[in-house]
Amino acid sequence: MTAAIPTKSYPTTPLSTKDSARSITTSTSGSSLADVLERVLDKGIVIAGDISVSVATTELLNIRIRLLIASVDKAKEMGINWWENNPHFSTQSQGLIEANHQLLQRVESLETELKTLRLNAAEG
């Protein structure tokens, strides 16, 4: 013979105003994902953490992680603009690197030619 397991039934009627006043209100209630993302990018968010690997009392590895999520305008406002001067993120700087390389080759060629002229002048 099997025993019947009692089940709890949940009301299907909407909450009364008394019950809805006790409901939990979150900071994102009624907000879409776009609204939340806009707030985060406008204000910025920092995530920080440390990872340490040790054996006994000897620390073998220590990693510090710092992550800032913000809009470009907010980052510039905070004084963060490393991407503007990083050659890997700027097409203009790639051209400058190539021009610098060509100039270095040209200077090396001129120095070699100058040494040759000086040796010829000394011999003659």
Image: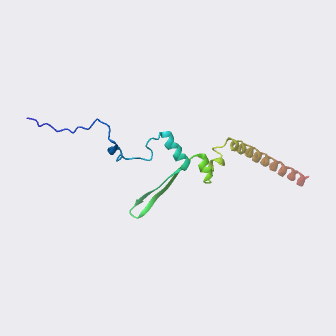
Left or right? Give the position of 113 relative to 8.
right
Give percent across and percent down for residue 35: 50, 41
Front-lying residue, 49 or 120: 49
Quarter occupied by residue 95 = top right
Quarter occupied by residue 99 = top right
Left or right? Give the position of 13 relative to 3.
right
> In the rendered image, is residue 54 in sight?
yes
Give percent across and percent down for residue 53: 43, 57
Question: Residue pushed farthest left?
Answer: 1
Left or right? Give the position of 11 relative to 64.
left
Count of numbered labels shown in the rendering: 0
Q: Residue at x 69, y 44 (%)?
A: 93
Question: Residue pushed farthest front?
Answer: 17
Front-lying residue, 124 or 64: 64
Quadrant placement of the N terminus:
top left
Q: Residue at x 13, y 36 (%)?
A: 4
Give percent across and percent down for residue 97: 70, 45
Question: Residue pushed farthest right?
Answer: 124
Q: In the image, is residue 121 above or below residue 9?
A: below
Q: Residue at x 83, y 48 (%)?
A: 113
Q: In the image, is residue 5 above or below residue 24?
A: above
Q: In the image, is residue 56 above or below residue 110?
A: below
Front-lying residue, 95 or 67: 67
Front-lying residue, 55 or 83: 83
Quarter occupied by residue 94 = top right
Here the colouring is rainbow
Give percent across and percent down for residue 123: 89, 53
> In the rendered image, is residue 80 in sight?
no
Left or right? Give the position of 33 relative to 119.
left
